[in-house]
Image (tube, rainbow, N blue to C red):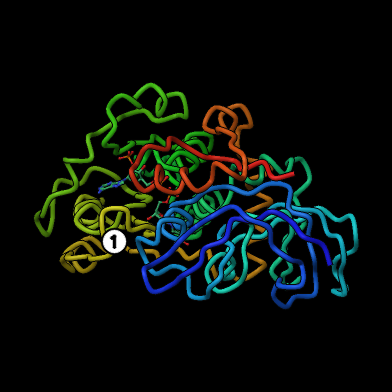
């Protein structure tokens, strides 16, 4: 059994520690596929795990990292063979199952999606759970029957990972995208992704009215709390808003008025336990629809040893777009 480098979260009486250290393959958890991890990424949830700010980690010691791209080394799963390139998002990795910030990982083959044609492992991790969640949000709006000619779409948490990829996807599909951000200095960045209008997130972050002026037909909300309530209250008749995030808060003190007076729908988005067929659909669409130049423009690359500091940065709202962790 080999020894490899891993970021390890441990817990003792005084709290949580996180260090880069040696880890033994013998201590990996059960699974029918062993991977050589080549790339990962840092999502908001990884920041919560790395800093211990929220009880994301439910087993200690834990290797954090909810997203992984790698090469199959050993497999007893009939769907995968040594040498296959795969990606993994969620399913409790980095929370209940040892995750991706390590040179090796052992997982259930059923959790794996083959790396889609046309995407490199680094690009897949630049997309990561954030980008895949953005795609799930866009798919949900489409399945609701909404299209760019119906009106504008608002994206909250615009300069974050989910928001940035959502803007790029929606703009490419022809939507008029209104980006809500707290970072006015990122206006040019958001416009380069395809946002047409930028609004200050303060317009949406306070306690609002049950119904406001109808401003958009669709929304991709990454923020929750008052922001989501206000986005709903300003959604046009028959529109829909996806909810994936809680960057402002987990609460939702909204009124039912948008639902019962304007037929607005609230569409929940979960990436973690999302069934495999929808994952495969989302990844296939990402491979064809996401502009690689824009993806490169929102991506910065760090090393495994940088992930601990990056976790704090993402919670502090200092990370623009997406971080790729180069492991191999
Ligand atoms: P990021 O940290 O990259 O982006 C979050 C963005 O939210 C920030 O960039 C900021 O955007 C905005 N924001 C931060 N704090 C506040 C605040 N107090 N009030 C209003 N806006 C705020 O995270 P991700 O894009 O990776 O994730 C976004 C959210 O989605 C997170 O809550 C995450 O947990 C959740 N998520 C959920 C998933 C699911 O399966 N449901 C999967 C992936 C993510 P700006 O600077 O532009 O204002």
Which quarter of the figure is the N terminus placed in?
bottom right
Vertical side of 156 occupied by 50: above or below: below
Q: Is residue 186 left or right of residue 118?
A: left
Image point 59% across, 70% down: which residue? 91
Residue 256, by quadrant, is bottom left
Q: Identify the residue at the far top of this view.
A: 188
Crowd around label 1: few <14 · some 14–19 · many ≥20 (10 Å): many
Camera-side residue: 102 or 1? 1
Camera-side residue: 10 or 229? 10
Image point 44% across, 67% down: which residue? 56
Image point 39% across, 30% down: which residue? 195
Camera-side residue: 147 or 266? 266
Q: Is residue 110 left or right of residue 322?
A: right
Can you give x and y, in whole percent of width and height, for residue 19 in the image? 54, 55
The residue wearing badge 1 is 264
> How many numbered circles are shown?
1
């Amino acid at each position: 059994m080999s020894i490899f480098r891993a970021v390890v979260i441990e817990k003792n009486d005084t709290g949580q520690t996180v260090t880069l250290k040696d880890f033994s393959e013998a201590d990996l958890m059960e699974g029918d596929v062993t991977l050589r991890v080549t790339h990962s990424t840092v999502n908001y949830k990884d920041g919560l795990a790395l800093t211990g700010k929220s009880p994301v980690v439910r087993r200690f010691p834990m290797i954090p990292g909810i997203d992984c791209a790698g090469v199959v080394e050993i497999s007893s799963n009939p769907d995968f063979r040594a040498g296959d390139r795969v990606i993994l998002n969620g399913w409790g990795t980095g929370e209940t199952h040892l995750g991706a910030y390590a040179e090796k990982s052992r997982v259930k083959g059923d959790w794996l999606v083959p790396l889609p044609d046309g995407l490199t492992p680094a690009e897949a991790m630049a997309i990561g759970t954030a980008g895949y969640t953005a795609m799930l949000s866009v798919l949900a709006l489409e399945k609701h029957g909404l299209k760019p000619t119906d009106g504008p779409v608002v994206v909250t948490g615009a300069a974050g990972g989910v928001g940035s990829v959502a803007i790029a996807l929606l703009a490419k599909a022809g939507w008029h995208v209104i980006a809500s951000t707290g970072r006015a200095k990122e206006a040019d960045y958001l416009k380069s992704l395809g946002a047409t209008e930028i609004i200050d997130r303060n317009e949406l972050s306070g306690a609002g009215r049950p119904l406001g002026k109808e401003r958009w037909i669709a929304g991709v909300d990454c923020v929750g709390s008052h922001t989501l309530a206000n986005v709903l209250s300003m959604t046009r008749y028959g529109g829909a808003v996806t909810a994936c995030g809680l960057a402002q808060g987990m609460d939702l003190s909204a009124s039912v008025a948008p639902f019962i007076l304007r037929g607005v729908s609230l569409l929940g988005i979960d990436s973690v336990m999302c069934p495999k067929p929808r994952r495969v659909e989302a990844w296939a669409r990402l491979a064809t629809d996401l502009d690689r130049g824009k993806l490169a423009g929102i991506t910065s690359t760090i090393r495994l040893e940088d992930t601990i500091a990056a976790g704090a940065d993402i919670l502090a709202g200092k990370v623009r777009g997406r971080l790729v962790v180069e492991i191999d």
